[in-house]
Amino acid sequence: MLREGGVIGSLLAEGRSSGTLVPLREVADLRGGVVTRANAFFIVRELPFDQIPRRFHITRQDYERVTVVMDGLETPFRVERKYLRPIVKGPEALVTPTTIEGTDQRLFVCERSRAEMEEDRDTGALAYLRRGETVAYNVSSDTLKGGIPAQRSNIRNRKPYWYSLNVPPSAPQRIVVPEHVDVRYPVSLLGPDEDDHVVIDKLYVARLYRPDDGHVLLAGLSSLLTWFQLELRGRTQLGQGVLELKKPDWGGVLVLNPAFLDDAHRATLLDAFAPLSSRQETNGVAALTDADREAFDERYLSMMGLGDPAEFRMLLAEELRAAVQERHLRRQSVAEARASQRRVQRSSSSVDGYAARIVAAMDPHPDPRHLVPAGARMTTVPITGSVEGPLSVGDDLFTYGQVFAGTERVANTIDDESARFVMAVLRHDPELTAVDVPAKAAVVMELLEVESQAWIRRFDRAAQPILQGIAETRLREAVRRRALQLLHAQ
């Protein structure tokens, strides 16, 4: 309430008091996604027919009733299809407001007793249950997530059976919303074709009290007004500037009351929302200036009768950008402190891992020996020491023309350009015992400088997608330096 501002706060309060706006909890039943407590056992991957091992002897006709799945230990199992349900897992599954990502992942759902399964001769599901009672699924370093699923403390006391996930019954219209949000605000409607889909933890399901309101509420939850409220209600406890939204946060979001809309207003609103209903937006903040987005938000706000829609939309957009920027700046402000608290071993392994990804996308730094023209007059400079430590050249009168590895002098040349040539060669090949230096080393080093600048630009482009995912400033700089060393640029 303190962050929403006087103008916006008064408009929202006015809409709430008049009944034009209602909390989401009053028009939908909000529930959390199914929590399995043992994803490696309950979430499996269905194999296509042509990838099923021959030893299972499954024909095309059998495939309509049974299939073969891979569990979290990459072990194939024959399971009856009636025990498998498609899943919606994570915000990435919410592709567009009307599209759910199709995957080969399935949820093993069984609410029947063993006697009932034996009576129906569901031998595949029975065998898989026995596996859950005898095999340890240690696929995570977290000790709380290991061991035999049926014996885990948070599973064995389930009722009526340890394998009961208590999946809620389907509903004609369900809207799926995420628990975590960054700059993308994914919301998706599960239509009739997704009746059998099960929503997994880290997502919430809004089961509509009136199924006919599905598309109207979908439009409302995809609006700028909802995005702004999410920024106010969410909390940045994840350390990466990502918003965390709990069920009460979503339940308190104010949306346009569908009961206030007649058929004509519904049609008008949905027509404005149609261009966005099948569009995948990777960055909601960047999409605020899209013409279709502006037209829809103004139409949505105009139906509330709260002041000038265009002015209200501009105010909301400005406040939303400020809130997102504040959230990201807050993440950066604590990044250095978080980096200093990490163990050295973890930081080192992270540096090497990130640097290796950059190196894989780049060619090595240019070698000056490739720029020496054929037939050039050369002078051999002996390497008098072991090349260990960072390479440098002398920078004063007494060390002019000398090359150092750490604090040890390893080469002595006639001028500064020749010393830089030797240093650049040793970065590529530190085991050399002598380096052939061209008489016109200055010309070669000028060419190297041109190629090096172009190479650095390519390096920065290749490194940007990887470095921007590292929040800690010191770790990011360490990764960049390590990648440059591996590519012989430092």
Image (cartoon, rainbow, N blue to C red):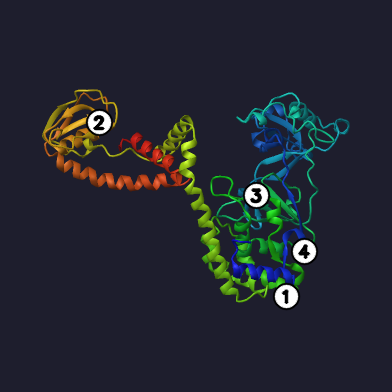
The residue pinned by badge 4 equals 212
Which of disc 2 and disc 1 is earlier in sequence? Answer: 1
- Callout 4: 10 Å neighbours few (<14), some, many (20+)? few
Which of disc 3 and disc 2 is earlier in sequence? Answer: 3
Mark 3 belongs to which amino acid?
Glu
The Cα atoms of the two marked residues, 4 and 3, are separated by: 25 Å
Question: Which sits in the foreground, 44 or 187?
Answer: 187
The Cα atoms of the two marked residues, 4 and 2, are separated by: 73 Å
Residue 251 in picture, x, y percent from top left: 72, 56
The residue pinned by badge 2 equals 426
Residue 202 in picture, x, y percent from top left: 66, 46
Give the answer, above or below, for where 296 lies relative to 357.
Answer: below
The residue pinned by badge 1 equals 264
- Tell me if residue 131 can be seen: yes
The residue pinned by badge 3 equals 179
Question: Which sits in the foreground, 204 or 39?
Answer: 204
Q: Residue at x 68, y 36 (%)?
A: 39
Mark 1 belongs to which amino acid?
Ala
